Amino acid sequence: MTENNQIYDTIIIGSGPGGLTAAIYNARAELKTMVIAGNMPGGQLTTTTMVENWPGFPKGVGGIKLMMDTLEQVKNWGVEIQNDTVLKIINNQNPSIPNNNQETLTNFQIELSSGKILKTKAVIIATGAAAKWLELPGEKELIGHGISGCATCDGMMFRDKVVAVVGGGNAACEEANFLSKICSKVYLIHRRDELRATPIEAKRTLENKKIEMVWESVVVEINANLQPLISSLQNIKIKNVKTSEEKILPIDGLFIAIGRIPKTEFIKDLIELKESGYIKVGSNEELPSMTSVEGIFAAGDCMDERHRQAIIAAGTGARAAIDAERWLKNR
């Protein structure tokens, strides 16, 4: 491990809308700030072809362009960007550890996969959450070209077209109902013979005339035109789990709603997580983005398991940055 002797006021883990917004706010507050960008600078939004619900863009904006411009904005404020991933955060706020030099006090050490060790007074975790995928051949290549994990992000690309949603919980039902307002037809494919969603959400879905239920079935094959730059989904093959009958379903879009995985594995032994793995915040009423560990804050989809919206992630990033600034000032 190589130790960096610089001491940062805040280190932000994650470079999606939440993390980068936090970086802008902390830099404007004249805090020495670093962003650890991970292996996908810009976060999940870079897989969205067109963002149409971000204020200020009347005709929408490409997901990659939006995040690359935001990264440039962050750099212009003097924030350091480290393209690396975090292995561990070490909490040094232990009274039993002697540290008499308060001017060089660091509350946390961050170990990176490259072998570097960073020192910081506060941490903002904004690592996001990733959609669970079907893990079928050709699936990953079609993300953003016919396959998506977010209807509110990509649904408008399929106006008046035929789409399918995979899943049976609240998320799948919400996606299907949302898409039914845009698309000509929505298939909801579920491996069981009843929905796992809440009664009200299930009722709303089953009574929607534009949604056709495909019960006791799973997707076993994705067929597409995989030419460079013009890749597109053509159809899927589904299989009945009871009869083993297979059939081809021609669709224009496929939305996967079988759950999301928050990227919090590296902190599971450090801070309090919900049973679902999302970060629990709100331990301090005056600093609502603080986690169970003083000085560690959270923003974005790693702590918000419901909304999955870039604009909300950005808002929580601003809140976490302001909370971190106040906490540092009070100390």
Image (cartoon, helix red, strand yellow):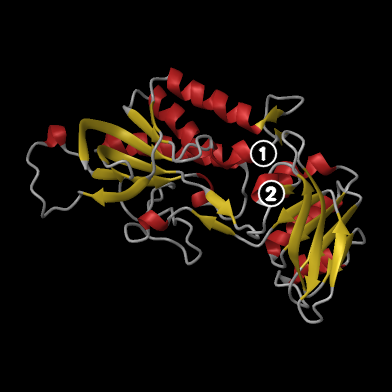
Q: Amino acid at mark 2?
A: Cys
Residue 101: give x, y in percent of width and height: 9, 36
Image vertical order of residue 223 relative to residue 56, above or below: below
Residue ranking furthest to the top: 76
Q: Nearer the viewer, residue 318 or 212?
A: 212
Question: Horizontal placement of 157 versus 131: left or right?
Answer: right
| Real-space CA distance between mark 1 and mark 2, rounded to the nearest whole angstrom | 9 Å
Q: Earlier in the sequence, mark 1 or mark 2?
A: 1
Image vertical order of residue 252 relative to residue 170, above or below: above
Residue 18: give x, y in percent of width and height: 51, 38
* Residue annotated with mark 1: 48
The reply to whether discs 1 and 2 touch (Cβ–Cβ < 8 Å) is yes
Residue 140: give x, y in percent of width and height: 64, 49
Q: Is residue 12 visible?
A: yes
SS of the residue at dot 1? Answer: loop
Q: Amino acid at mark 1?
A: Thr
Q: How many numbered tags mark residues here?
A: 2
Instruction: Single out the mark in the foreground, 1 or 2.
Output: 1
- Residue depicted at 39% across the width and 48% down the height: 290
- Residue depicted at 43% across the width and 53% down the height: 282
Residue 150: give x, y in percent of width and height: 69, 49
